Image (cartoon, grey):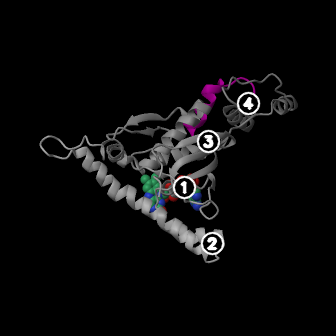
Amino acid sequence: MPDVRIITDPTVYVLGRPSIDQRELTRLLTDTGFPLWSTNSPCDAQALVETGARLCYRSFRGGRPHGEHVRHLIEVGHGSCLEHAVWTLVVTGISRTCSHELVRHRFLSPSQESQRYVDAADVAFVLPPALVGAWDCWVNHTGRGLVVAASGDVDPRMEIGLWFDRYWYRPARAAVESYAELYGRLTADGMPRKAAREAARSVLPGCVETRIQLTGNARAWRAFIEQRATRHADAEIRRLAVAVHAKLEHEAPGLFSDYKRVPLPDGTDELATEYRKV
Ligand SMILES: Cc1cc2nc3c(=O)[nH]c(=O)nc-3n(C[C@H](O)[C@H](O)[C@H](O)COP(=O)(O)OP(=O)(O)OC[C@H]3O[C@@H](n4cnc5c(N)ncnc54)[C@H](O)[C@@H]3O)c2cc1C
């Protein structure tokens, strides 16, 4: 069987973002007696949050400037206004183990690649963050002749690399071999392909890559970030939550820049805010 590709980081794609119909906004403002109102919001996502909040109090005249207004909503926990801003992200390069945790967030609507329809013979493995060092030894220090010192001692980096090979890479790859064998035998015996994959996938390891599209509003994304971008979360989903936050902060700084990076002993970061669960 050929080598299985190993993925070390997730990729986050922003497929969908909020957009305001300016003509309809103008019509609304005219009809409600505020034709002169405008906002200096940097993006439509934040503008939608602002219009929702201003509608509550019919406050389309005077009041706080945009940035202050949105910050105030977060400070006082007027979180329902944040639900008007919705993003659709696609995440690739995460493991099935990670996606199992991800889909527990009930306000992030998922569509996930199916293991019943999509053949897993050419899957990739997602490396758990704790094994990055061992993987590096495996890639750079095994089987290249530089590893035995003059004293006859084995380079410890080679030992770690071989350990990684024996206890992580080979068992995972063997599972994919079993999958292919099971699938091949069952379909050769006349079983429909979907049914054969259904049975064969039961031996796949948790590290196989999956792809998932998620749609959620700013409040739901914040809840996800708060629970998963912390030291208490699994390291892989923490890495993902930090990557998701970076994308969303770029999209709408007013809704996500209250999170601060806090360095952790393992060299990664967690995110912390004083405004949890708005
Ligand atoms: C560090 C960590 C360890 C974990 N370990 C485990 C584990 O060992 N086993 C396990 O099964 N899970 C575990 N989880 C998952 C966890 O239990 C939640 O399922 C997951 O974090 C989603 O949280 P949530 O339900 O608050 O979020 P969401 O589903 O996103 O809901 C958001 C918020 O909406 C409200 N809400 C949603 N649904 C309801 C409801 N039905 N009734 C009332 N309020 C509701 C709550 O305020 C909730 O916080 C762990 C999570 C973390 C972060």
Mark before the other along the chain sequence, 2 or 1: 1
Q: Amino acid at mark 3?
A: Ala
Query: Residue 157, located in which quarter of the rendered image?
Result: top left
Q: Which residues are magenta?
A: 60-79
Location of residue 28 in the rendering, given as x and y in whole percent from the top left corner: 84, 33
Disc number for residue 122 = 1
Disc number for residue 112 = none
**Front-most of 155 and 115?**
155
Residue on which disc 2 sits: 195
Q: Residue at x 81, y 32 (%)?
A: 25
Q: Is residue 223 left or right of residue 69?
A: left
What whole-number distance in Å separates the C-alpha atoms at marks 3 and 2? 39 Å
Secondary structure of the residue carrying numbered label 1: loop
Disc 2 vs disc 4: which is toward the camera? 2
Secondary structure of the residue carrying numbered label 4: loop
Disc 2 vs disc 1: which is toward the camera? 1
What whole-number distance in Å separates the C-alpha atoms at marks 2 and 4? 59 Å
